[in-house]
Amino acid sequence: MKSRQLLSLALALALGGASTLASAQNAARVIVGYPPGGALNTVARILADRLSESTGRSFVVENRVGAAGVIGSSVLKGGPADGSLLLLAPDSNISVYPHIVQKPVYLPLNDFVGIAHVGDYRIALAVNATLPPNDLKSFVAWTKTQSGAVGYGTAGAGTNLHFYGVLMAKEIGANMIHVSYRGTAPAIVDLIAGHLPATVLPLGSTLAHYKMGKIKFLGQTGDGRSASLPDTPTFKEMGYPSLAVSGWYGMFAPAGTSADIVSRYHDVIVKSLRTPENRERMRSLELELKDMSAQEFQAMVKSDTERWGPIIRNSGFTAGTE
């Protein structure tokens, strides 16, 4: 009798394990092309939990890391258009990427459909705290007194930060040259150590160092000043409206996903991000919410893609040159 009970228990456990495995295999996925720990991954987990609660279907975050987010984004192309595969990606992998390689692995405007704008992140021009300039005007003048172009570091060649720096240098008339790093952290380390004069990075990644007095901010993107940085003017208010543009994160699905699925997921995501708890979490990540429909988000992606094209072509950048 005891042996039968043990056999039944073993069978039940085996079936339970098989059921759990099947459930995991059938889970919907939110792809993130970057390692765990960053703002993008944090937001992805918030949204995956909410989508699971709202749809009754399990959503899991899958980190597919490599090639500055391109590997993760490429998973979406040709994927199932049934709501089981989503991508949370920054603008670099969507509106910038198609312009920096001769043969893109994917074309977001053709291969993806935008579901929701997830958050804007401000970009800031920061300099080492010991550098003489304390404002943008004096910084521009200072760059022209140096023996060579002043380096500005970003999180990598071919990113929106790289080309935002190119646009900034042209608009403000500064003598600047891009210095590519493998991520934000090493660029910030060199900035603080004085090995790098300036950085063009997301405000959220550098704000803590500013509060410790290790760096100075000379300008920030956005239409109005950040509540976290009220003493630093925006580029727009300093007379450079073309530099008001911020970076963004967005949720996407494979092309061919039905309008009904897009609409339902859009509503879940928007409502989730606007709860008091998640609003506070977004603020802590220095992400700003914008009210826009899925169609308005798709139009913004198209506009962004078209805007970056000539800027990148005029920069002379080709993949592998930096």
Image (cartoon, helix red, strand yellow):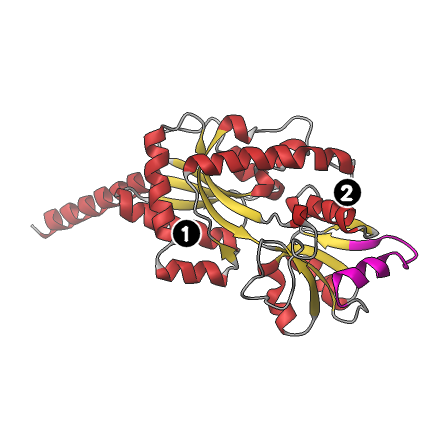
261 lies above or below 46:
above
Residue most extreme to the bottom? 212
Q: Nearer the viewer, residue 88 or 295?
A: 295
- Residue 141: in magenta span: yes
| Disc 2 residue crowd, few under 14, some 14–19, many 20+, Cα 10 Å | few
Q: Is residue 90 left or right of residue 140?
A: left
Most foreground residue, 79 or 277: 277
Residue 58 appears at what percent x and percent y? 31, 44
Rendering coords of residue 164 (x, y %): 69, 46
The dot on residue 162 is none
Q: Residue at label 1? A: 45
Q: Residues within 10 Å of mark 1 (few under 14, many from 20)?
A: some
List the single residue furthest toward the left: 1
Residue at left offset 18%, top offset 45%: 12
Left or right: residue 304 compared with residue 112 = right
Q: Amino acid at mark 1?
A: Arg
Q: Which residue is mark 2?
A: 322
Q: CA distance from mark 2 to mark 1?
A: 33 Å
What residue do we see at 75% from left, 59% from top? Answer: 198
**Is residue 36 in view?**
no
Q: How many marks?
A: 2
> What is the span of residues highlighted in magenta in the rendered image?
134-151
53 part of magenta stretch: no
Q: Is residue 270 left or right of residue 321?
A: left
Q: Residue at x 46, y 55 (%)?
A: 42
- Vertical arrangement, residue 47 with respect to residue 219, above or below: above
Quarter of the image with the C terminus is top right
Residue at disc 1, secondary structure? helix
**Which three-letter amino acid code belongs to the residue tagged 2?**
Glu
